[in-house]
Image (cartoon, rainbow, N blue to C red):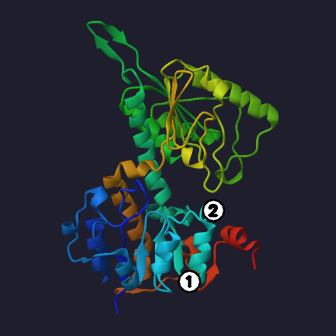
Amino acid sequence: MPIRLGVPREIEQGECRVALVPAVAERFRKLGVELLLETGAGAGSYHPDSTYNGVTIVSSAGELYQQADLILKIQPPTEAEIAQMKEGTAVAGMMLPYRYPERVRKMRDRNILSFAMELVPRISRAQGMDVLSSQASIAGYKAVLMAADRFGGFFPMLTTAAGTIRPAKVLIIGAGVAGLQAIATAKRLGAMVEGYDVRGATREQVESLGAKFVDTGVSADGAGGYARELTDEEKQQQQGVLETHIAAADVVITTAAIPGRPSPKIISKAVVEQMKPGAVIIDLAAEGGGNCEATEPGSQVIHNDVIVFGPLNVPSTLPVHASEMYSKNLLNFLSPMIEDGEFNPDWDDEVIAGSTLTRDGEIKHAATREQVEGSAP
């Protein structure tokens, strides 16, 4: 019997994305899957029910949860949603177990098979499944547009009858996926762009996009491509050079977020007070408290004439392409588990095993298990 795949409407306030777009729904159908969609699930991303060909539209989430064998989500299922699922249901989406341990406990107790898409191993063959990268790319792009909208001047150099206008100076802190996309976008808008990362190995990536790498004279490169712990003297030298560049910038975009941990504080209020009046800080790490001491997550504040904005859930502000990319990530992740419409995961596969959060009444992810249960069995 073919598996029934269900997509509920996201209930988190401000969430406009949908876990399945019509084009990807068609590809799931070709795998022999039966598709269920809660009415209005795609409305926020401009995919009305009528665009989902061959998909059964159900009137309520409760009805969908009782019929579906596999649920696709964007936001972690709430306790109320988990309670509506059939025992033994499978669910795939962002689970944020460090933020919602009680939801993990409830999925364990109801024997829910849950795949946390943020736990997908970051290996070459899993790149097409990497929701963190796809959504971070969107956030980096949108952060620059948010900055340009708030900055009181032009980004590019302009030669006019009234004289030449110099380009804006934009500093991107963090050269991960979001940071590199922000660098590329700021360059496309004509700004003078600098990029900074504690890992000196990112210099080539930053410079390949046409930006200048901020060299602090300190390398934090460690084993396996990760950053090593710096000495106090190195930290002081690094921070001193970076603060000089922050003070000179018209726009600063910070992207240093660490899943499951508070965002590192990189910009103190004292440094904000050294910036130009009218300068803009866009803090993409606001979900974890922010990289700037002046950041108020979800709000825009003015600190000493500097605009500081800490947006939340930035990918949802571009729901059309965010949904498309996320939906393709899910397809790439789930399609190897579906054969002739039936769901048969290979538990020896490192991608499947590594992303499994709960299964058979147990918490499989070691760090989450320790957080929820106190210690590993």
Q: Nearer the viewer, mark 2 or mark 1?
A: 1
Q: Is residue 296 above or below residue 130?
A: above
Q: Local crowd at mark 1 within 10 Å, few (<14), some, or many (≥20)?
A: many
Q: Residue at x 52, y 21 (%)?
A: 305
Q: Secondary structure at mark 2?
A: loop
Left or right relative to 291: residue 17:
left
Q: For the view shown, which residue lies furthest in the top direction? A: 162
Q: Is residue 5 visible?
A: no
Which residue is identified by label 2? 98
Q: Position of residue 263 (x, y in %)?
A: 63, 46
Q: Amino acid at mark 1?
A: Arg
Left or right relative to 127: residue 32:
left
Q: Secondary structure at mark 1?
A: loop
Left or right relative to 6: residue 313:
right
Which residue is identified by label 1? 110
**How many circles with numbers are drawn on the protein?**
2
Q: For the view shown, which residue lies furthest in the bottom direction? A: 1
Q: Is residue 61 visible?
A: yes
The quarter of the image holding the C terminus is bottom right
The quarter of the image holding the N terminus is bottom left
Q: Position of residue 12 (x, y in %)?
A: 44, 60
Q: Amino acid at mark 2?
A: Tyr
- Kindly indicate the quadrant of the structure image that contains residue 243: top right
